[in-house]
Amino acid sequence: MSQPKGVKESSKLVKDSSKECVLKKPMECVKRRQCWLILKRMLAGRDGLDLKDPPPMVDNVSESKSLEKKSKAIGLKEIERKLRLYATPDEFASDMRLVFSNAMQIYPPRNHIYQIAKKFSENFELKWKSLKDEWELEDRKRRKAHKSRRY
């Protein structure tokens, strides 16, 4: 099948291990796959079951705060469903952080779900920083290679 006129080589159809990334640059698919791996590792363990679904809303929270949370309640399974819809990795990270912060706001610090959310949050932030550094390094290398080809 020939490539449509005006479509660059870098935007070919690219497949990852589980789904297709239609007309996306390969790096976007790589980032999506790395986000998916972070999420799958959390969902795979027994602890991930407690964060799989949005936390129940509690009545002892002020009404305005409760309404705000209801519109933003999210669980890890919902993030998994939305993974292909995120325009940037930072949108994924924002939703991940929302899952952890919701759980830590709803449950008291001694609750096991609070502890799981705190542990997942700390692990996520470490992994996320490492990935962001890796992506930035790759971008710098790509820009440097591009500049050297121009001259």
Image (cartoon, rainbow, N blue to C red):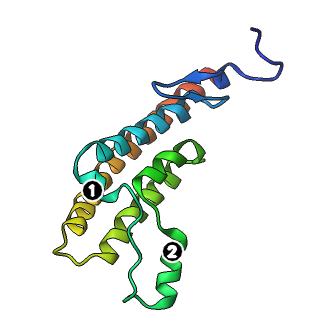
Asked if labels 1 and 2 touch by Cβ distance under 8 angstroms, the answer is no
The relative height of residue 124 versus residue 151 in the rendered view (above or below) is below
Helix, strand or loop at label 1? It is: helix
| Residue 151 visible in image | no
- Where does residue 36 sit, x and y in percent of width and height? 42, 40
> Looking at the image, which is closer to me, 82 or 25?
82
Helix, strand or loop at label 2? It is: helix
Give the quadrant of residue 39. Answer: top left
- Give the residue displayed 52% in from the left and 54% down from the top: 91
In the image: residue 52, left or right of residue 70: left
- Where does residue 135 sit, x and y in percent of width and height? 44, 39
Q: Residues within 10 Å of mark 2 (few under 14, many from 20)?
A: some
Q: Which mark is residue 99?
A: none
Instruction: Kindly report the distance in space between the C-alpha atoms of the residues bearing marks 2 and 1.
Output: 22 Å
Residue at the left extreme? 110
Identify the amino acid type marked 2. Answer: Lys
- Give the residue displayed 39% in from the left and 62% down from the top: 99
> Looking at the image, which is closer to me, 28 or 82?
82
Q: Residues within 10 Å of mark 1 (few under 14, many from 20)?
A: many
> Looking at the image, which is closer to me, 77 or 36?
77
Q: Is the N terminus in the top left, top right, bottom left or bottom right quadrant? A: top right
The relative height of residue 125 versus residue 136 in the rendered view (above or below) is below
Identify the amino acid type marked 1. Answer: Phe
- Where does residue 25 sit, x and y in percent of width and height? 61, 30
Q: Is the C terminus in the top left, top right, bottom left or bottom right quadrant? A: top right
| Residue 64 visible in image | yes
